[in-house]
Image (tube, helix red, strand yellow):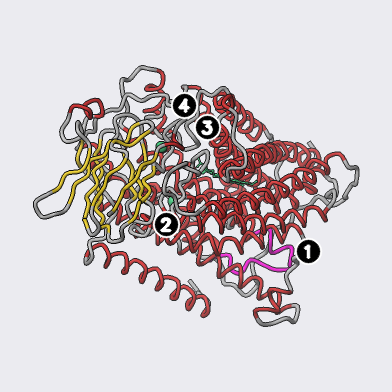
Amino acid sequence: MHIHKYERWWLTFGIGMLFIFLATIAFAAFADGINPPSGMQQLDPAKVASTPPFDHPGLHKLHDGSYEAYFVAHIFAFAPSSITVPAGSTVTFYVTSPDVIHGFAITQTAVNMMAIPGWVNMMSHTFRTPGTYFLVCNEYCGIGHQDMAGKIVVQ
Amino acid sequence: MTAMQTMRAENRVVIAHLYTSTAAICLGAIFGVFQGFSRAGVVSAPAWFDYYRILTLHGVLMALVFTTFFITGLSLFVTYRSIPRDRKTTAGWLGWTVMLVGTAMAAVTILMGDATVLYTFYAPLKASPFFYLGATILVAGTWIVAYEVLENVAYFRKQHPGEPLPLPVFLAASTFLMWIIATIGVVAEMCLLIPWSMGWTPGIDVMMTRLFFWYFGHPLVYFWIMGAYIVWYTIVPTRYGGKVFSDALTRLTFIMLLLLSTPVGIHHEFMEPGISTKWKMLHTVLTYGVAVPSFLTAFAVFASFEMAARRAGRTGFIDTVKSLPWGDPVFSGAGYGMLLFILGGFGGLINASYSMDMLVHNTVWIVGHFHVTVGGPAALTFLGCAYWMIPRLTGRALWKPGWALWQTRLWFVGMLIMSLSLHYAGLLGAPRRTANVSYVGMPIPNWEPAMMLSAAGGFILFISIMLFVAVAVGTLFANQKTEDMTAEFAEPEPESVPTPAMLQHLWRWGAVALLFALLAYAGPMHEMLTHPAYLAPGMRTW
Ligand code: HEM
Ligand SMILES: [Cu+2]
Ligand SMILES: [Cu+2]
């Protein structure tokens, strides 16, 4: 097929840009390990309240000084509703839902994932700057959705 | 029947589709402006008609009803006018009736508060079965229209062996082939949802429903975009004395859209558990692929502008832009829509990228984004195109063309204000789909000024839609006849080479597209089937 000269330039430029974007994403994924959350662990939504560690959701300190935080997102609140960690801590968040879908997002960080009944989703973040961070459900879950929020306090 | 009678009968069907879509955008805009003010904290919804019911109506009316009825109307129109024959309009009417019945069923269920599940109806939010049935019937109606378009393709091929299909019909037919493949996803999802909402099955596989939903959800977006491209390629050039830059390239663009629109849906599921990162990565790569036909379109549209400007003795970028008929509401609708798409395309590349999406997922950035894609290039092009179709359907001159022109300008400005402020508030983390964003006593970033500004933009949009409705309805009552009801479609530039036969094989490309879609989903589907999930019983949380 005949393709006009300028068109070829334009297409080369466009597709070239796409490849550059893709290469950046691939680099971030493979070299820096920047991947979206993809928790593959399953959990019966009917048994969230009786399955450790979600039966006592909250913060657990590990030997290496980092933290694991287990959250249950349920209508219309997070359990726990707030946690406190020292500045510089790396926290791995685990979240599941016993009822409908919810969001789990901490503003001013890249923590942003879906809480889906039947699954445990996870994501890590290092909190360098002290302050109070806003934890919010950012997926519609029902009539009280706009009240579903919490806090991450970094001291 | 005489040719004139046939045309009148055809026009009546198209008018039915077009004005149904007008009614939908009118109602949708009333809800939309309310949402803007509610989220800015200026008003709040009464308990008997809560915010989420309003938002469900807005999403369904705008994303599913307005757009779909417009595209079915447009496709019937270009098909009827490009392939004249002594035809019956039964299929067009049947499609319209079925679509309307489905819409009414879903709308009444939402109004009654039995389906406050938003237009994405994510399980395990459990709506009344009538909502799911209504949505399915709406889709079934679109298939009847698809049949009508494709039947005319077959008729033309039989009557004119070896001749290429008229370009507008080729574009409409490839759009509907894409749509048929995409809507398989809805049907599959409904096969899970309907028995569950009837109480026949104890629970639902949530991730499976989401996979099916987004198998449909992304090509839905391209259904709107292809509708707008049909107008940009074949109707808009007639407004500035232009031509189709290249017939072959246009067909190639639509074939690429047909092939690449479906196998990308997982880019809506980046933040979800239960899908491995390899499938998320695959769909990221394919998503970048589907940007290519839009690059081609940007080129072709500008090239067509430039050729027309050169013929008129104007050269250079500024001069070319100035030579365009910005005072014509048909052109300005599409023209401003194209400008908004620059913003939309840029944002889209960010959302689609696997890792950057974390920063914007489910924030109002996304709301800002789709209002400059479906609300910009698609909706505004459709409104402009309505100003072109209405006189050709009714035989009446447009009532208040000055209002029509101001409508497109206000839409552009209102959309820029609303969308840019939503993009900004989204970067601060303001969540989408919430009745308000005040979160009393919580440490929220200062996104309130941006939300106020977005409400102001929404108000301008509301005024714009009211002008549109006034012109569209006013034309039906004002008695200014026009004699000429013929619809001309743009011809290809004379120097372009004949279109290769390879680009004519619609059915074959449709089959390849289906294969692509199945392949792109085979991996994730296999993963889900081999790791059966716990079923969620579902509930009504509103
Ligand atoms: C008068 C013009 C409009 C205004 C003021 C408006 C305003 C809004 C606002 C403020 C939201 C966000 C609500 C939230 O997340 O809580 C929204 C959502 C939405 N709008 Fe519009 N909009 C308008 C026109 C349109 C058009 C023309 C379309 C598409 C053709 C559209 C499609 C949507 C969709 C699909 C949603 C998402 C609904 C959801 O999240 O479930 N809107 N609109
Ligand atoms: Cu929520
Ligand atoms: Cu998409």
| Chain for disc number 1 | B
Q: Earlier in the sequence, mark 3 or mark 4?
A: 3
The residue sitting at 55% across, 64% down in the picture is: B342
Residue receiving disc 1? B327
| Chain for disc number 3 | B
Choose top left, top right, bottom left or bottom right for residue B536. Answer: top left
For mark 3, give the secondary structure: helix
Q: Which residues are magenta?
A: B234-249
Amino acid type of the residue tagged 2 in the rendering: Asn
Where residue B487 appears, as percent x and y from the top left, is: 75, 53
Residue receiving disc 2? B351
Q: Would you say residue B515 is visible in this rendering?
A: no
Choose top left, top right, bottom left or bottom right for residue B105. Answer: top right
Is B245 one of the magenta-colored residues?
yes
Q: Mark 2, residues whose alpha carbon is within 10 Å: few (<14), some, or many (≥20)?
A: many
Q: Earlier in the sequence, mark 1 or mark 4?
A: 1
Q: Earlier in the sequence, mark 1 or mark 3?
A: 3
Q: Earlier in the sequence, mark 1 or mark 2?
A: 1
Q: Nearer the viewer, mark 2 or mark 3?
A: 2
Alpha carbons under labels 2 and 3: distance apart: 31 Å
Q: Earlier in the sequence, mark 2 or mark 4?
A: 2
Residue receiving disc 3? B140
Amino acid type of the residue tagged 4 in the rendering: Trp
Q: Nearer the viewer, mark 3 or mark 4?
A: 4
Where residue A102 appears, as percent x and y from the top left, is: 36, 38
